[in-house]
Amino acid sequence: MRLLEWFRRAAGPVSRRFVSVRPPPREELFDDDFQRKLETLAIVSRRVFAGRLRAERRTKKKGSGVEFADHRVYVPGDDFRYVDWNVYQRFGRLLVRLYEEEEDLSIYFIVDCSTSMGFGNGRRFDQARRLCAALAYVGLANLDRVTIVGVSDGVVARMPTTRGKGRIFKVLGFLRELEARGTTDLGSALKTFVAQHKRRGLAVLFSDLYDHEGFANGINVLRYNKFEPYVIHLVDPREDRPALRGDVRIYDCETGEEREVTVTDRVLERMAQAQAEYRAEAERFCTRNQVAYFPAEVDAPFDELILRVFRRGGFLR
Amino acid sequence: MVFTGLPLATLLPLAGVAAAIVVFFYVLKLRRRPVAVPFARIWERILRDQEATHLFSQLKRLLSLLLQLVLLTLLLMALGDPRLAQTLLEGRSTVVLVDTSASMKALDVAPSRLGAAREEVRRLVGSLANADRVLVARMDATVAPLSTMTDDTAALEAAVDALAPTDTRADLAQGLAFALDVLRGLPHPEIVVVGDGAYGDLAAVNAQVALGDMPVRFIPLGKEQRNVAITQFSVRRYPLDKSRHEALLEVTNTNDVPADVELTLLGDGDVVDVTRLKLGPRERLPRFYADLAGANRTIEARITLTGGDRDYLPADDHAYALMPERRRARVLVVTSGNTYLEAALLLDEYLDVTLIEPARYPPPGAFDVTIFDGVAPALAAGTGAALYLDPPAEGGPVVPDRAVDELFGFDEWDRKSPLVRWMAMADIQVASGHTLHPGPGDRVVGASEHGPILVSGTRGGRPFVALGFDPRRSDLVLRVAWPLFILNTIDHFVQEDASYISSFRTGDVWRIPTPSSASLAELRDPSGRTRSVPVQHGRAVHFGDQAGFYELVVPGEPEAAKIGFAGNLVDLAESEIAPRTELGLGAPPPAARTALSPGIRRDIWVYLVAAVLLLSAIEWFTFHRRVTV
């Protein structure tokens, strides 16, 4: 009977008992060192944008602010007060001065909480939460309205909108409680998100973009609903050359979808190419649709990544 | 193609079962290691490309299965030991009897007759035709196969290398009988005898063995016949003066021309006597050396030809003999006075005799033999073996049966018993005495018409001899037989047997008396090799095939006993080394042999196994290189 059982186990389909994703290690996500770096980042962000930012954020709206933005041709109905008479005197053309309207900026941090984010030892998910915490701190320090939501195939967690640097501990506590669990469906999740948040603003998406329905759906939902999407793509270089060899049965950690693969050097090379193509595809999509895209490696120091985000622009204006 | 190993009827079911097992394991779905991935869609992109190679993968898997089945088929065919039917039909079965007797040590051909025999057999093995099979056997006093009936030239070469000469005669009749037994039922049988033809009376061989139509081929060896040999040799101590001995030997000239011989006698390695002899054609000259002294253990005789002649067989120029070891026996005599007994004991200077009154028994000390003269006290430690003269009714090992008061004598006696050796027993007259009642296991050595009067046996591990009358009440004490009886009995007790065999003849089964009841003994032969030999009924059994001095170690209490003896080739038939050109057995000559067809080795199974190994190596290499993964 034991032999029969052995044959059943040898010949039968892969049992779920043998399938597991290693849980992330228990370590302090936001330690003291992390919090010291947050303060440094806030100071650096002020210095980088000094003279242009006076502790406020600008929107794309042109309005009655004090900051000159541009000229445009006068059309009937425009307020005469904004006609630039100096220009008219010099060039004989009626142009209207445009000012950037000042308002509180809403920043939405959307953290992908699907299982794939916690795959392996959870480095990707930890990096996403650290980046989210850092950017949230910068936003809070600049008196922006900060909202954080966790999504997988829906909105799985939401931190109410808050502002002020003093709320950072609330942010950290919220992020600490997030778990990577569930399947990825950014389209469905972000539809729920936009329905819940009428006030438009910057939507920073932290995700690995491993969406079986296609990552474009979710980003497009943000675009179509007048949000300004900013995609931070969490990339794990280990997935380019996984430590596999020989005959294996792979299965998707979210859907359980199985395939039999014989992993050879050639297959691993193709895997690296496929990963690069996938990232290039995401970047092409974002560039084509004027969506800010930033790839973030999971092992890179988060403070350096944040500075690169600042330097690249688009997040702070 | 014919399978000479496992038959086809066995191979086919075996192949079916094995193939089913192989196919089952291939059909069995490969259990793959489950591995989680974060996003299977990316793998799908790769696998889409691999779909194109899926057919090739299936083909590789099928090829792998076919390869396994091919390997299986090859192995099973190898088990069947396939042969070409044609070669099997043409094969001959040959038994090669190689003479390894003493005469094959003759040096008239280089390097020796046996060396030439080896070359002849090698030549014969090298000329085997396809499917011919040969068995090589040595033939001396016994016949022993050195190989199986095989066509494996390596095995046959090894058998030829194992041929070694012995100091025994050749028994052609036994060899032919062995060959007939081996060849019975085999196709195209043939017997080949390689030797010098010194096989004694061939008419007797013909009478013993019915060869019938069996072809017998004789390959003669040897050129010369000049040889002088020692054909008899024996040495013994004098029973009453063991410091001296006498030797008898016989020197034989086996040639038709006279020979001048120098005979040297060595005692314990030192020259004792040198004699020059002149032998006529085919003369057998006995020589008797009396009253020799100066040797304690070994006597060796050597002969050499003088006058520039060469003796081509040195093996029979030596003869060896070993004399029993002398030692002083301690004898205790418990008697109230017996002049005849004391006189008899005086004759052997190698006895330490202690006389005591019966009342003083036991005295301090240990003795080899105690003689109880008319008394039978309780035996004390250190008594040794016991000789009872006229034992009383109580205390003796045997009970006096009934008194006899009329004249009687020895009407029956055991002539082979060492106790009565050289004694004239028939006319001994006894005035009065007792018959003895022997116990179980006792041996009646002598008896009168009234019953046993001389009994030997063992009590409590201690040997005894009991005489049922007082010798003084007979004329025994007046005869030469009296001291002989006393000394024979003492010699028998202390294992210093005057009948000691100074040498054994090689080619016989030797039965060497041992003092212990051990079942195994260690025998060291003249070449220094040690082997275990069985001991049966107190005698170590060994088939002697080497001349020289042997030493037998028999385990026992309190210490192991060492027994020396000698083996001699004293065989006139072996010394007749004149080569014979034909045997004249009347058997038909064998058909002419066809030469071996060179090139392909005839064992197909070897190539099948080699093919399996080659295919396995290729398969392993390609797998290791991921070509077939």
Image (cartoon, coloured by chain):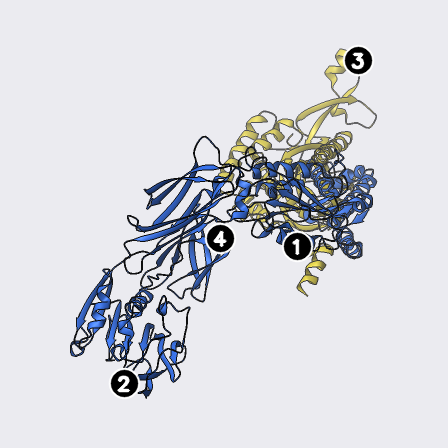
Front-most of residues A39 and B3: B3
Q: Residue at 38% across / 46% down in the picture?
A: B300
Quarter of the view holding residue A299: top right
Is there a contact, CB below 8 Å, between mark 1 and mark 2?
Answer: no
Front-most of residues B243 and A96: B243
Closer to us: mark 3 or mark 1?
A: 1
User: Which residue does the numbered mark 2 point to in the structure image?
Assistant: B394
Q: Position of residue B13 (x, y in %)?
A: 79, 57
* Dot 1 and dot 2 within a common chain: yes
Closer to us: mark 3 or mark 4?
A: 4
* Image quarter of the N terminus of chain A: bottom right
Q: Position of residue B264 (x, y in %)?
A: 37, 41
Closer to us: mark 3 or mark 2?
A: 2
Say which chain tag 2 marks. B
The correct choice, above or below, for B444 with respect to A104 in the image is below
What amino acid type should be assigned to the residue bearing mark 4?
A: Gly
Residue A92, numbered label: 3
User: Which residue does the numbered mark 4 point to in the structure image?
Assistant: B544
Front-most of residues B171 and A176: B171
**Measured Cα–Cα span from mark 2 to mark 4:** 49 Å
Say which chain tag 3 marks. A
Q: Dot 2: within a 10 Å radius of its alpha carbon, few (fewer than 14), some, or many (20 or more) residues? A: few
Q: Which chain is blue?
A: B
* Dot 3 and dot 4 within a common chain: no
Q: Dot 3: within a 10 Å radius of its alpha carbon, few (fewer than 14), some, or many (20 or more) residues? A: few
One can see residue B604 in this view: yes
What amino acid type should be assigned to the residue bearing mark 2?
A: Glu
Residue B177, numbered label: 1
Residue found farthest to the front = B280
Name chain A's colour.
Answer: yellow
